[in-house]
Amino acid sequence: MNEIVNGFFQAINLIVTLNPEVMEITLRTLEISLSSTFLGTLIAVPLGGLIYFRNFKGKRSVMNLIQTLYSLPTVLVGLLVFLLLSYQGPLGGLNLLFTPGGMIIGQTILILPIIIGFTITALKGVKGEIKDLSMSLGASEFQTIYTIMREAKYALLGAVILGFGRAISEVGVALMIGGNIRGFTRVITTTMSLETSKGNIELSIALGIILLTIALIINLLLNQIQEK
Amino acid sequence: MKRNTKILVLAVVIIAIIAVAAAALSGYGQPTQVLKISTTTSLDDTGLLTVLEAAFEKKYPNIDVQFIAAGTGQALEYGKKGDVDEVMVHSKKQEEQFIADGYGTQRYPFAYNYFYIVGPADDPAKINGTTNATQAFNKIMTAGTADPNTVKFVSRGDNSGTNTREITIWNSTGVNYNNSVRGQPWYIESGKGMGDTLVIADQKSAYTLSDSGTYLAYKDKIKLVPFLTQGKDLLNVYSLIPINSTKFPNVNTAAATKWTDFVLSTEGQTIIGEYGKDKYGQQLFVPIAGKPEPTS
């Protein structure tokens, strides 16, 4: 119990004094997780739109698969991407194993299903009339998709936030693909796991509080946008 | 027809995004020459490697040393895949096999210390006074079998160097580890690193085998006390093994050689011998470069 209280004060201390190591780790964490969220959004939102607007055989199975992949274990993604990027793996030549770039690829794959799935849900929330109206006014399919996406933009933002939340809080991919190299691939979650195993419980709790604070700030910012 | 074109355009756009991203990422974060070393958590957790790295990078500013810490089993696995340039581990048998299989060039012992057998201060298995690890483990096994509620042993169970040694000691008591130890009610496998395992052993008032560095780092946070801290069967030798560049042409042999030479040099060995005296009040590692490997 004492450790939690002390961890809280240490977190404040680390933030107020701008502790260089904590700042560096925090910035790297943001850089990597925001990159994967950006990349994930770029791929998943159009893909989600496509799945929603098109009727094709096996659409239901695709939806089931996407929803199942919400539970994709981070360690499994870590392992698969590790094998892909390993020197003898198919993408070994890219030299991405144990680099931030490799971590971004892993995290992107990890959050794709969630963003795709929630994009579809967001689009389902838009009234059907808009689609019909838009089409009947002579809009092309792409114009229609664009119109509906605009209607659903707040819900889409929610999908992106969810993806970001999963990326920044995961430890499996970061550890297996990044290797937790000090000053290079070490992020908040992997530092927490390392410091806990070294017995620096309070520092771990402090870092956990910092991570939650970042999440809070980002959510506040996005809520601000949503209310406008 | 028009629809198909659009799908095609979309597909091309997605592929282009991925390609650009991959190209941008591959250049990302490889500033100078990189030397990747996989090592054991027990060595990394002591903080020694950070000090060695700082001294080395002062000498060779264009080489960025990067440590990937895992259990010895996994650290060697990275080497077997050609994903690192060198390994720093502590499990002689596995290391010799690693070299025999052609993955590593040579084994360079650079330091040693001893594993500790630690346990609750009231010592329910009465191992205090035993003279070697086999004897102590034998007593723990007998007492644990008789009363698994009071006498327990927590194992790493993770194929690490420490875990490998522990199993060797169980087998040296004359019983078959898999039949008489593993799965017994008094024997708990944590599946975690040394630090976590010490905490679990502490909470359960159990015995465990620990490397000395991690135990000393944890000493103030747990109530476990060391009973055996020396002896032939607790000897813990750390070695460097450069990865074989004939097998993996991508390996940075030049940098690996510089690192090996540095760790074995007078400067490196002095850092190793002095390390821990200020922080833990005692030496954590005994340097052994240029001397015969200790046998007890």
Image (cartoon, coloured by chain):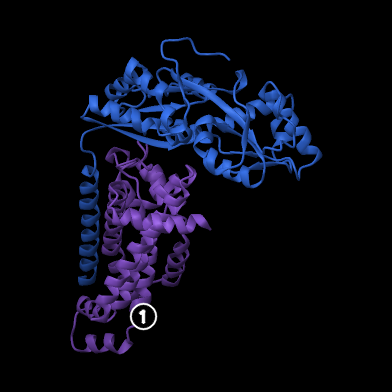
* Residue A100: % across, % down: 30, 47
Chain B's colour is blue
* Residue B177: % across, % down: 69, 31
Q: Quadrant of residue A132?
A: bottom left
Q: Quadrant of the N terminus of chain B?
A: bottom left
Depth check, front residue: B67 or B73 = B67
* Residue A197: % across, % down: 49, 44
Q: Which chain is purple?
A: A
- Mark 1 highlights which residue? A124
Depth check, front residue: B39 or A157 = B39
Residue drawn at x 21%, y 75% is A142
Q: Quadrant of residue B9?
A: bottom left
Vertical relation: B142 (above or below) B254: below
Query: Mark 1 belongs to which amino acid?
Result: Lys
Q: Is residue B284 left or right of residue A161?
A: right
Vertical relation: B291 (above or below) A135: above
Vertical relation: B113 (above or below) A58: above
Depth check, front residue: B292 or A199 = A199
Residue drawn at x 69%, y 24% is B134
Can you see residue A80? Answer: no
Q: Is residue A60 left or right of residue B188?
A: left
